[in-house]
Image (tube, grey):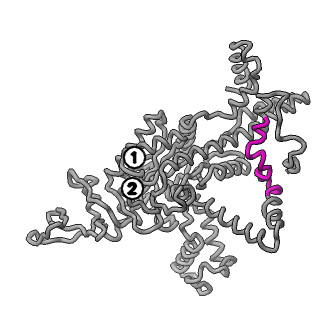
Amino acid sequence: MSYQRHIGEMMRTIESRGAPWAGIDGEAAARMRAQNRFPTGLDIARHTAAVMRADMAGYDADPAAYTQSLGAWHGFIAQQEIISVKKHFGSTKGRYVYLSGWMIAALRSEFGPLPDQSMHEKTSVPALIAEIYTFLKQADARELGALFREIDAAKAAGDAVNTHRLLHKIDDYETHVVPIVADIDAGFGNAEATYLLARKMIEAGACALQIENQVSDEKQCGHQDGKVTVPHEDFLQKIRAIRYAFLELGVPDGIIVARTDSLGAGLTKQIAYSKAPGDLGDRYNGFLDCEEVDPADCPDGQVFLSRGGKLVSPKRLPSNLFQFRPGTGEDRCVLDCIASLRNGADLIWIETEKPHIDQIAGMVDRIRAVVPDAKLVYNNSPSFNWTLNFRQQVFDAWEKEGRDISAYDRARLMSEDYDATELGREADERIRTFQADASKRAGIFHHLITLPTYHTAALSTDNLARRYFGKEGMLGYVKQVQREEIRQGIACVKHQAMSGSDIGDDHKDYFAGEAALKAGGKDNTMNQFAAA
């Protein structure tokens, strides 16, 4: 419905209520409604699920149309990310927000900083989703409020052409509310616990939930050691639980991202149940590292399996965990992905130990031989040393080609000395094009960086503290922060407006009319940034 029609509808509603509603202005009410397009989290989840489904179809048609996101640990960080996207690119299309369980554990837990081991409060996950969408909706309200003030000024000046242009701009307005891919870890418990948490996350607005195949109470960060996976049926129960949550809440297009940590996980907590040879349970058990045993020599307390007509014993550690055969990680990843996609998952996530296109593509080719439209979400992780990895890849490729590499020491490739060299430049170019190349070659639909704003906050704060508390003093802030905000057009330089003071002034106008005591008067120091 157009803005003008909203005004007409509001005015008719107000008129129908008679004199008691005479103090309510129809256009003001229509403006407030436009500034709050998504009243509930479920409205957001339905809208963003449709956006993401359309993007997935677009990627199937053209692998160059991949999507991206940055991880955010606060609503303000997510808001500034999406405001920046709109400012620089004119559209949010293909840009999402990632919600990282790692960052919630490290930055949002009441216990203080925690490792990524599902020890933080699970309620903090839906709470952060709701917080992010509160800030994204506020970005809409702020931007639309500015357009409304422009319309008022154009009407007051009798400028019909500009008024018409602004009305169209409002009708075509693109929201800051974008999809969130939200990390539910390993579900924080059994399938019922997963369902209950998924429901809360969806109610908060999440349209895409990412779940991993680790044991919930042994969960580790995907880039650390000691990961323990679960049999497929255990994982599929949680995938089904999430789908039921989506369906129950009326979000049938909700997206489930099934993550496998099998590439780096060499342990399992249990032996899978198998009904028949070749089923998922049997195949999972087939990866166990076993030793053949003599039936006549079976000590008490030992676990045995029948394999190929022989009695074997899985190797069990003092932790009571069973280990997989070395070198089976890729095969287990492929089986995990196929099983997940065949049983309700929409996207897959393979957690790798390095960003190597050929490695990812090798697994994806095998998956797509069974599920042709398989699509990946990929973690462009800060846990990777991107500079070192790609310089090593270039070095090794050149060595294989027989090129002269005598000017380079593989053990020193991180050195700043190599930044301006041919090897350094080629490695940087491979990093620059990694996402586009991997999306075309390795089926990656969505690229994300899990922890970028954790690192940018640390880096920028370190730079500010070094300058401000050092010789530069106040110039350390003014030169490196405020002056750059002004020159780069960063909206936060007007921090009062960003925090909502202009929106509040608009509401005071609506509620109190001429009696309104507004913050944005001539004595507001934010007026010093009027031209910024």
C-alpha gap between disc 2 and disc 1: 10 Å
At label 2, which amino acid type do we have? Ser
Name the outermost residue toward the bottom: 406
Residue drawn at (66%, 34%) of the image: 36
Magenta highlight range: 485-505
Q: Label 2, secondary structure: give it.
A: helix
* Residue bearing mark 2: 216
Could you tell me residue 349's position as x and y percent? Answer: 46, 55
Query: Mark 2–mark 1 contact, CB under 8 Å?
Result: yes
Depth check: give the residue in front, 202 or 489. Answer: 202
At label 1, which amino acid type do we have? Ala
Q: Is residue 303 above or below residue 147?
A: below
Could you tell me residue 467's position as x and y percent? Answer: 77, 70
* Residue bearing mark 1: 193
In the rendered image, which quarter is residue 231 located in?
bottom left
Question: Can residue 337 be found in the magenta stretch?
Answer: no
In the rendered image, which quarter is residue 410 located in?
bottom right
Find residue 117 and name its label: none
Q: Is residue 157 left or right of residue 274?
A: right
